[in-house]
Image (cartoon, rainbow, N blue to C red):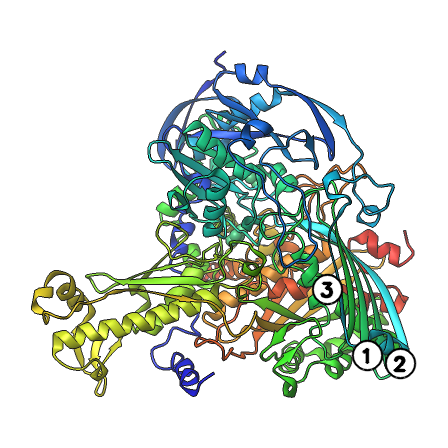
Amino acid sequence: MDTSLEISLTVNGVPVRRRVEPRLSLVDFLRYELELTGSHVGCEHGVCGACTVRVDGELVRGCLMLAVQADGCRVETIEGVAGTGEIFDLQQAFAEENALQCGACTPGLLLTAQEILRRNPRVDEAEIRRGLSGNYCRCTGYHAIVQAIRKAGAGRAGGTR
Amino acid sequence: MSEEARSAGARITEGESYIGKSVVRPQTARLLAGRGVFTDDIKLPRMTHVAFLRSSHAHARIVSIDAGAAKALPGVVAVIAGEEMARVCGGWVGTLAHFKGMKSAKQYPLAIGRATWQGEPVVAVVAESRAVAEDAVARIAVEWDPLPAVTDPETALDPSTPVIHPELGDNLAFELELTSGDVDRAFREADAVYSDTFWMGRHTGVTLEARTILADFDLSEQRLTVYHSFQAPNMMQDILARHLRIPEHNVRVITKDVGGSFGIKVHIYPDEMAACALAVMLGRPVKFVADRFESFLSDIHARDHRVKAEVAVKRDGTILGMKVDDLTGIGPYSVYPRTSAVEGNQTVRLTPCGYKFRDYAASLKVVLQNKTPMCQYRAVGHPIAFAVMEGMVDRVARELQLDPVEVRRKNYITRDMYPYTSPTGYFFERLSHEEALDRLLEISDYPALCAERDTLRSRGIYRGLGLCTFIELTTPGPAFYGVGGARISSQDGCTIKLEPTGKLICMTGVTEQGQGTDTMIAQVVATAMGVPLDDVRVLTGDTMVTPYGGGTWASRGAGIGGEAALLAGKALKENVLKVAAAILACEPMDLDLRRGRIVDAGTGEVRLDLGELGRIAYFRPDTLPKDFQPELAVTRHYVPRHQGFAFTNGIQLSHVEVDVDTGFVRLLKHWAVEDCGRIINPRLVDEQVRGAVVQGIGAALFEHCVYDEQGQLLTGTMGDYLVPMAAEMPEIVVDHVQTPTLFAEGGFKGAGEAGVAGAPGAVLNAVNDALAPFNARVTRQPITPDVILKALDKL
Ligand code: FES
Ligand code: FES
C-alpha cells in the first residue's frame, strides 16, 4: 500500500517537490532524498542538536520533525546558510579558534551560534553556554566554541556600533 | 643518542619552522560548510542497508528463529542468521599471547545458539532501505529461553554463579599478580596504613557520529572495498582479509571523515563484520549505521572497576608502599584483537608511577559478565589508576593534616632520578612532575584559591580543590600488541611526492578523526622540506594508497607519524637538492630549499623555483645528465626502537563547589599542565587536552551505563545517559612544560589522552576537599548527587 504523500517546500531557496513516506524525518529527507548531508544525526531524540536546521527562520531539530510537516515551509540547511555568506564570520572564527575537531557537531552548532548572535551579538560567555545547552560536542570540550562565538559576536557588535 | 641527532633535532625548530605554530587546520573549511564526507554520506549504486535483530536478553538460548514474514516483506534482500553467516565469516578470539593465561570464547558476527548480552546481533536483515530492514526485523519471531545473567563482577567467580562459556571452565578471562620490592615490610614499618575501595562505573564513548561501515564486494575481481568510520584501517584490512578469506591486497579500507572515535572505533564489532560478510555474500554494497540505541548497547563500554587500595605511610607523608586489588568486568567476550585485559593491566601498572616508592603489590582479576563488551577507551586504565593513587594521596594528606601539595612533592620521582624504571616495569626517559606542579601552582594561584575556600567555608559555601598527577602512555612500540601476536602495526610510514608544479602530496599511515593529524603532518613536512605549509596536501586513511601503519590509538600520531613525516621530508629534500644541483650544475651541498625555492646555501639568493624544478624533472629530463635519475617521491618509516613507550606527564587541578543540600557539584574552573615533549601545534594540543578533560569530567560526574540485575541496560538513549554539555562545563586553562624526547629527532610525544587521564581524579579530590568539613568522602564514580548525599548521611 502506498502511503506516501506529496510535499512541496523550498530548501535553501530552491523549490522542491517530492513524494515521501509520512514516517520520514525531516533530517533523513534532507540527507537521503536531497543528498544534503551537511545536517547530521546524532541521537534521533532531540538531545544532541546535530540535526539542527532552520524552518521558516526558526531553529528546528530535524530528527523531531517529519518531512511532511515541512510541506509549504522554507527550509535552510548548513549548505544553504554557508553558501549565502551569512555566517562567514562564524566559520572563520570557528576555524581560527579550532572550535571543531571531527566536525560532526559543527553544522548544528553554527546554525545555533548564528541564532544566539542574531538575538544578541554582545552576548556574554554564560549566555553562550546556555544557548549551546542543546548541542552536544564530544571532541572540543566547548571552550573553543564559546570563544569563537564571542569573537564573531564582537566583530558584529563592533560593526553595528 | 648521538650529538649529531641532537643538533638535528634542535635545527628543526629554527628558521622557517612551522613546529610550535598554531596554524589553522585548512581542512576545517569543508566541515564548516557542511561538505564533510562521513561514511553515511556515501551512496553507492545498488546499495543496500542492514539492520539487526539484537538480543533483548542479557543471556538466553535461541530456541528458534522464524524469519518467514520478514523475508516476505517487499524490499527485503536477505535475512541471515548465525550459522549461515559463520560459513562466510569465521569467528575470532580476543586474546594476546603475552597476557599469560588469558582466555576468551570464540565470537561470531551473529550469535549462534545463545546470546550473551542484551544487544548482541542475532539476525541480519538486508533491504533496499534501512526503514524496510527495520520493518522486517520487527517481523522476525525469535523464541528465547532466558538463562540466568551474570552481572556483578564481585560474584562472577563464585561457584554458584553460572559459567557464561562452559568451554572456558570459569568466568575468569585474565588475572595478574604484580609484586615489586617488599610490600609487607613497607606495611610493617609504616606509621599509618589507609585503605579505601573505589567503584568506577561503566561509561562509553558516545561519538557524535555513530559507528558506520559501507562494504562493497566486486565478485568479478574478488575485491572488497570498505568505507569505514574507523581509526586503524590497516588493522581492519588484515582482519577482513583473514576472516572473510579474501587475499589481503584485494581488501581496501578507506576512512573518510570520522565523527569522533576516542578508542571506540578501533575494535572489531560483530555487526560491522557481518555487514562486510553480507556484501561478500550478496555481491552488493551493504551499509550499516548504528542508531544511538545500538551504540549504547554495542559500542564498547569502558572502565567498570572495583579497586581496593591500601597505602602505607610515614607520619611525614612519605609513601612506603601500596597494595592494589582491581576487579574489572568486561562483558561476555574479550574484544578482538586488542583484548579487554589491557584496561586492567594498565590500571595496576600505572597506579604507582608518579611516585618513587618501590614496594608495590597489585592483583588484577578480569571477569566475564552478561553486559556489553568492555574494551579500550581513550586513556586506557589511566583515569582509574590516577583517581585511585591521587585519591589515596589526598586521603593521606587529610588524615595526617598535611598539605596535599607537599605530600606530592615529597613522593615524586625527582629530576635527578631519570632515566627511571617504575616498579611495574615502565621506563621513563624524563618526566617533569616537579616542573609541572610548580607551573600549575603558579597559573592557578593555588594559595589564593585555598585561602578563598577557607574563608567561604565559614559562610557555609563548600568549595574544594583537587589535584591529580598523572602520566600518559604514548607512542607505543611493538611490545604493546605485536609481540602478543596481534597484527597491529606499531610502525608508520610517510610518503611524500613532489608534483610537477612543485607542490607536495603527502600520505601517512596515521589517521585523522578531527584531532588535526593532517595539519600536524603538514607542519612537520613543510618544516623538514623548507616549503610553505600551503604547498603540502595530506592524505590519510586509504589502505590502497597510504603507507602501511597503525592509525590512531595510544596517542601515537605525533610521536610515530610525525617522526616518519620528518624523516620523509628530510629525505625528499635531499633528493630535490640533487635534482637542483643537476640542473644548476653545482653540488647539492651548495644549495638549500627555503620557502619553496632552491637557494644558494651561503647567500640565500634564489636559484630555482620548485615548480621549474618539477617541470624539468618530469617533462624535460632530457636536459639533465644522461646518468642522472631524479627521485621525487620518497617513503620513510618509523617505529620507536629505544623505549617501549614515550611516557608523558602532567597535573590537573579542579575547583568545584558542592551544594551540600542537593548534592550538586558546580565546576568552577579547571587547570591542566602537561608535558608532551616538543609541541607541533600548540592550539591543537590545547584543544586535545580540553576535549579530553571534559570527557574525564563526564566520567567523574555524569556518564554511567546503568544496568538492572537482569543485565538490562537502563541508559540506552541520550536522554538517559548524561553527557557533558556546554552549560555545565568550566573554563579550562591549559599550559605546558616541554621535555622533548631525545630518542627521536622530532622530540614529539603524544597528547591525546592526558586530559582524560587526570580529570576524574582531580574532580574526585576536589569534591572530597569540599566535603572535608563534614568528614565525608566519596570513592565512587560518577559522583552523582545521591553519592554525595549518601556520603553526607543525608540519604
Ligand atoms: S539527532 Fe536530532 S537532536 Fe540529535
Ligand atoms: S567536533 Fe566532534 S563532536 Fe564536536
Give left or right: position of B560 versus B790. Answer: left
Tell me the CA gap for discs 2 and 1.
8 Å
Q: Residue tagged by mark 2? A: B189
- Spot occupied by residue B19 in the image (x, y as percentages of width and height): 41, 74
- Spot occupied by residue B494 in the image (x, y as percentages of width and height): 37, 63
Q: Secondary structure at mark 1?
A: strand
Sequence order check: which comes first, mark 2 or mark 1? 2
Q: Residue tagged by mark 1? A: B320
**Residue A96 shows up from this direction:** yes
Q: Secondary structure at mark 2?
A: loop
Marks 3 and 1: in contact by CB < 8 Å? no
- Identity of the residue drawn at 70% across and 58% down: B344
Is B689 located above or below residue A103 in the figure? below
Res. B348 mark: 3
Give left or right: position of B494 versus B263. Answer: left
Tell me the CA gap for discs 2 and 3.
23 Å
Give left or right: position of B362 versus B31. Answer: right
Query: Is the CB of the residue bearing disc 1 within 8 angstroms of ligand 2?
Result: no
Residue most extreme to the left: B623
Give left or right: position of B734 versus A5. Answer: right
Specify the subunit that label 3 lies on.
Answer: B
Tell me the amino acid under the disc marked 2: Glu
Marks 1 and 2: in contact by CB < 8 Å? yes
Tell me the amino acid under the disc marked 1: Leu
Dividing the picture into quadrants, the one containing residue B465 is: bottom right
Count neighbours of disc 2 (C-alpha within 10 A) and say few if under 14, some if 14 to 19, many if 20 or more: some
Specify the subunit that label 2 lies on.
Answer: B
